[in-house]
Image: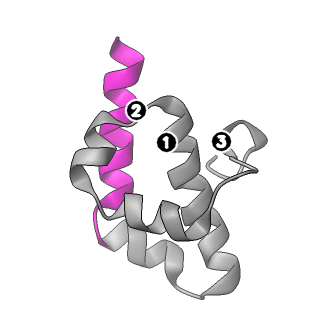
Amino acid sequence: MAGDPFWCDYTYNPTEAGKLLQDDAFIAQATLDEIKTLLTYCVRGERFCDGHWDAVLQSGRIAAILRRLAVLKAS
């Protein structure tokens, strides 16, 4: 689950993470630690803005993150 401690980046910068989440090229090359930052932003965003999680799902950002994770797993 994305909210599990393994996936959390306790030092993330929400403003920076939000910008990075909009960058398809960044997501396509993200490291596991960077993926954790993006997922932390997605999960924590729902605490401050109802519908945030749905918005990132609908935007295709979660799918892009999952595709990157599949690549990282395969390598």
Q: Nearer the viewer, residue 14 or 6?
A: 14
Q: Quickly name the residue at label 1.
A: 35
Q: Quickly name the residue at label 2.
A: 69
Q: Residue at x 46, y 68 (%)?
A: 18
Q: Residue at x 33, y 59 (%)?
A: 61
Q: Quickly name the residue at label 3.
A: 7
* Rendered view: 65 above or below 42: above
Q: Residue 25: percent from the left, percent from the top?
A: 22, 47
Q: Specify which label sits upstream in the sequence, 3 or 1.
A: 3
In-image side of 23 versus 4 (left or right): left
Q: How many marks?
A: 3
Label 2 close to label 1 by CB (< 8 Å): yes
- The three-letter amino acid code for the residue at tag 2 is Leu
Label 3 close to label 1 by CB (< 8 Å): no
In-image side of 61 versus 32 (left or right): left
Label 3 close to label 2 by CB (< 8 Å): no
Q: Specify which label sits upstream in the sequence, 3 or 2.
A: 3
Q: Residue at x 31, y 24 (%)?
A: 71
In the figure, residue 66 lies in which quadrant?
top left
Find the distance from the CA under tag 3 to the CA under tag 2. Answer: 12 Å
Q: Under tag 2, what secondary structure?
A: helix
Q: Residues within 10 Å of mark 1 (few under 14, many from 20)?
A: many
* Rendered view: 1 above or below 54: above
* Rendered view: 19 above or below 35: below
Q: Quadrant of the C terminus?
A: top left
Q: Residue at x 30, y 38 (%)?
A: 67
Q: Residue 11: percent from the left, percent from the top?
A: 73, 51
The segment highlighted magenta reads: 59-75
Magenta portion: prevailing SS class: helix
